[in-house]
Image (tube, rainbow, N blue to C red):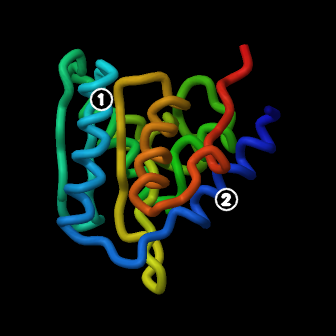
Amino acid sequence: MAVAEDIALIKRQEDVLVFPAFDEAVAFKIGSAIRDRALAENLPVIVDIRTFDRPLFYAAMPGSNASNPDWARRKINVVKRFLKSTYRMVLEQQRPDRTFKIGEALDIADYVLAGGGFPVAVKGAGVIGVIAVSGLPERQDHGVVVEALCNHLGINGRELALPPEEK
């Protein structure tokens, strides 16, 4: 799939994966589902779910490492700043060094172009938070979040899933 098609599909994901309401219980349910999948599939990830004012769920799986929380923090900052998926930002920016253009004035210590951060959008309120997964290749981090959101919202995930990356 071409980059433009991936970007279009991610925009569709962002438009469709909207919550009627989002609170601590929803964050726990989604976080627990991602954690359960990670344990079942031996995915070495961390999961960080938060609104823009406070953390709601965090879990670190076996095999994750000390850098994963920092990657998640920087992904969270990108979603907070741009209100869109970090993997979409990766594809739009096309910067192999994982940094933003100098003109953006975004410090690499606080912002990174890496997939796995997805906006938590609520109908009537807009983007209020982030779900971040870190530990897998970025397209897979993104896919883990999208699949969990589809499952939670009762949406056919096959229609929204990105195809495997072409080599």
In the displayed structure, 154 sits above or below 32; it is below
Q: Amino acid at mark 1?
A: Ala
107 and 66: which is toward the camera: 66
Which quadrant is the N terminus positioned in? top right
Residue at image mark 2? 12
29 and 115: which is toward the camera: 29
Q: In whole angstroms, how far apart are the C-alphas of marks 1 and 2? A: 25 Å
Residue at the outermost bottom position: 124
- Which label lies toward us, 1 or 2? 1
Specify whether 15 is left or right of 75: right
SS state under label 2: helix
In the displayed structure, 35 sits above or below 10; it is above
Q: Residue at x 44, y 63 (%)?
A: 153
Specify whether 125 is left or right of 90: left
154 and 61: which is toward the camera: 154
Q: Amino acid at mark 2?
A: Arg
28 and 99: which is toward the camera: 28
Specify whether 14 is left or right of 135: right
Residue at image mark 1? 38
Residue 40 percent location from the top left of the image: 28, 25
SS state under label 1: helix
Mark 2 is surrounded, within 10 Å at the Cα level, by few (under 14), some (14 to 19) or many (20 or more) other residues, namely few
Mark toward the start of the polypeptide (1 vs 2): 2
